[in-house]
Amino acid sequence: MKQYGVNELRKMFLEFFESKGHLAMKSFSLVPHNDNSLLLINSGMAPLKPYFTGQEIPPRNRVTTCQKCIRTGDIENVGKTARHGTFFEMLGNFSFGDYFKQEAIAWTWEFLTKVVGLDPDRLYPSVYLDDDEAFEIWEKEIGIPADRIFRFGKEDNFWEHGAGPCGPCSEVYYDRGEEYGCGKPGCTVGCDCDRYMEVWNDVFTQFESDGKGNYEELEHKNIDTGMGLERLAVVVQGVDSIFDVDTLQALRNKVCEFANVTYKESEETDVSIRLITDHIRSATFMISDGIMPTNEGRGYVLRRLIRRAARHGRLLGIEDGFLAKLCESVIEGSRDGYPELEEKRDFIIKVLAQEEDKFSKTIDQGLHILEEMMQEMKENNEKTLSGEHAFKLYDTYGFPLDLTKEILEEEDFNVDEEGFKASMEEQRQKARKARKVTNYMGADVTVYESIDPSITSKFVGYETLNHSSAITVLTTEEELVEALADGETGTVIVEETPFYATSGGQVADTGIIRRGNNEFVVEDTVKLLGGKIGHIGKVTKGMFKVGDLVELSVDAGKRQATAKNHSATHLLQKALRTVLGTHVEQAGSFVNGDRLRFDFTHFSALTPEELAKVEAIVNEKIAENLPVQTQIMTLEEAKKTGAMALFGEKYGDSVRVVRMGDFSTELCGGTHVANTGTISAFKILSETGIAAGVRRIEALTANGVFHYYDELEENLAEAARIVKTTPASLTVKLNHLMAEMKALQSENESLKAKLAQDSLGDVMDQVQEIKGVKLLAVKVDDVDMNGLRDLGDQLKDKLGEGVIVLASAKEGKVNLVAMATDTALSKGAHAGNLIKGIASLVGGGGGGRPNMAQAGGKNPDGIEAAIQETAKVLEAQIK
């Protein structure tokens, strides 16, 4: 059996199922989209749930993927065993109401035995206890003897999670040999030892469960296959564990190189080696998907992995900053399957370097303090670290509770977790009471927390932009006050306001609050706790007092322009779903009076044709002058209308549904136009990717579009003036100029080549013979790299067979070129290695192919030495 590498196996699997009519899809991001039940993607089928549930139509009824996954349930065991890991790749083939058991089992067997070449006699299938259909396929169609097919119960061979689609499984086990067995009599498939390793799992989703033990046959049955790539590689490569397969072994060896240790010499050392090897893979992939180290959620998982790896690096004696270097090996080993690693290389390195540096600044001090705490516990015969001490380590030295627990467990101690939580809460309470005003524009500022909780505000801005109401609260930046005078900055709260507060991606209204001749300019409007709305700004005339009846006037022009942009985002979302598919979900937005920005889930850049279609649909709906109607209803009623909800948003019992004709229906609390015709026009400015699986469109509406085209016309006219023509004739003129420029460049190159040749003179008398191979190594004055290559080609024609090396100094820099003919190559000459051998003499480096290579340098004074060295380097190459 050939020992295929991890990258080969991944490619083989995907290509095999492509040959069976499957669409090979790229791995989805580790960040779940449209699924708030998961913190991180933990299986191959997780990102495909909408296709299985029917919420979305799959791009094809047969799909295959290699999905990156992270599971942290056994994180404490990572490193301690060779089995556990947090990051893994899951190979999968999926059928959405297409093929079923017969094809799935046949292809399982074909891939394992024919494509990969596993010994059929070492493969053992299992089926669910009552799945006679699968048993017969294995026995009668595949030809496996009945005594080698194992029937297991629900716990092992039936996939279900509460109510919903479910079904039996069929797994395939590989016998790794007696040396991996437990040695107990009767050890066979299903034993917990390492002898029989599961390498494939076909899930046959054929029932709908009500969660109470009742199962109904599904009309459209599905296949969900899962197979760990690293596990398969263990079997194929005949190694002991996932840490011994080619890609992880290379990474593991790099850890050993950094630490100057040898694997499998010390179990204590091995734990750290394995842990670092696993965690740096996870961290690298997580960062490439846009996850950043934080103190909560998936960001905390990342921070925990980085800090565990950093600490174990120290245990091995590795210097600071090694994780940022080590991730390069992860990228090198996996970039073929995951090009995003290469694309995000600099970003990944930067994030790891910053996080490790942040941790290293406090870890030494923290470890010293923890050691003192443990020593004190030993002296007092105590086994539990107090919550106060654990919190001190967290608060002062950045030790996550998990890290403290891990270090304590190594010394057979534990920690008072409840006490830790109590200390955390106490600190939060103190911070609230003592906090100074640090962000006046935010909602979480001490002065606002002092407001009577019973005070609230009502938004009336859907119906009017001008409204009278009484002031209930006035504040400065630091305290509640009874009055605000001319020139003072503060916040005004009233009973009812037409001002829209920033939310849902829509910027706040601005405007004026008046009382007679007194004026307060509203610069921002914010939502505060308890349903209060704060108008932040400055008194420009007179004085305002609590209890005053005031006139609130919203800037109508800005509100209307913002409403046009907001309504356009609704049309845009529906147009995107129409053109790209129903997987498109809003992932964020920003609308103000000038432009709109819309973020959405999609996994590739839009083509010019797709963008044009989207823009055309939005403009069509604007031209149709669709009525924009709003309605308050329950969330359940809203769902029945098909209203789009923002993923991750929490909604109350009553929601506001915004409907634009029969085209768009969304839940939205923002302000909108009365009909789509008011938007006038829509123009997409840009479409870019902002994170894995998230794209961003920026666009203009109404006057913004007209200003855009006015500016475009001005620029066009200016360009035409510069080249002395009219805008209508600009293209023709530019084509003429480009043709002239091309001719001049060609003439220039010819002259440069001639000058280079003239400056070189007749150099054929400088040809040397090195072990039967001709060598021409000469210096040329003031020639760039392109000129050297052209000159080398000409001299090669004159030389016939042999090696040419040219060096030139131009503008203080050195250019080197080496060329070798076929005959010279056959005798051992190698242009790339030749360049490497002499480039250091000119203060540079480089390389290339055997027949042609080049290098740059910073030391023109070394050219003569480099030319002299050429003969020695070539002589060493010739056989």
Image (cartoon, rainbow, N blue to C red):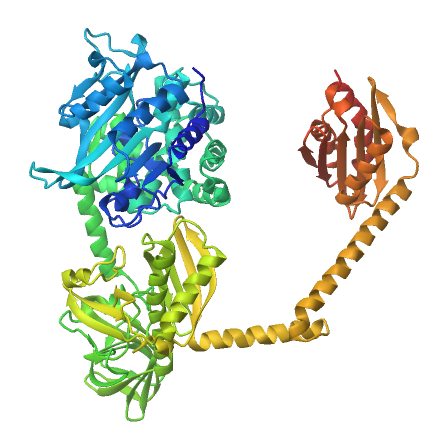
Residue at 20% over, 84% down: 469
Horizontal side, residue 598 vs residue 864: left or right: left
Residue 374 seen in the current view: no
The answer to which of 460 and 704 lies nearer the viewer is 704
Residue in view at x 15 percent, y 27 percent: 155
Q: Position of residue 435 (x, y in %)?
A: 27, 61
Residue appearing at x 83%, y 37% in the figure: 794
Examine the rendering and report whether any part of residue 169 can be seen: yes
Give x and y (percent) for residue 103: 29, 29
Count the numbered circles shown.
0
In the picture, measured across the screen, residue 169 lies left or right of residue 345, that is: left
Is residue 217 toward the left or the right of residue 69 in the image?
left
**Farthest residue toward the front?**
140
**Residue 462 falls left or right of residue 30:** left
Q: Position of residue 578 (x, y in %)?
A: 35, 59
587 or 861, which lies in front?
A: 587
User: Where, quadrant-wise, is the N terminus in this rendering?
Assistant: top left
Residue 802, x across and y down, in percent: 81, 26
What is the quadrant of residue 801 in the picture? top right
Residue 19 found in image quarter: top left
Q: Nearer the viewer, residue 466 or 166?
A: 166
Quarter of the figure that contains the C terminus: top right
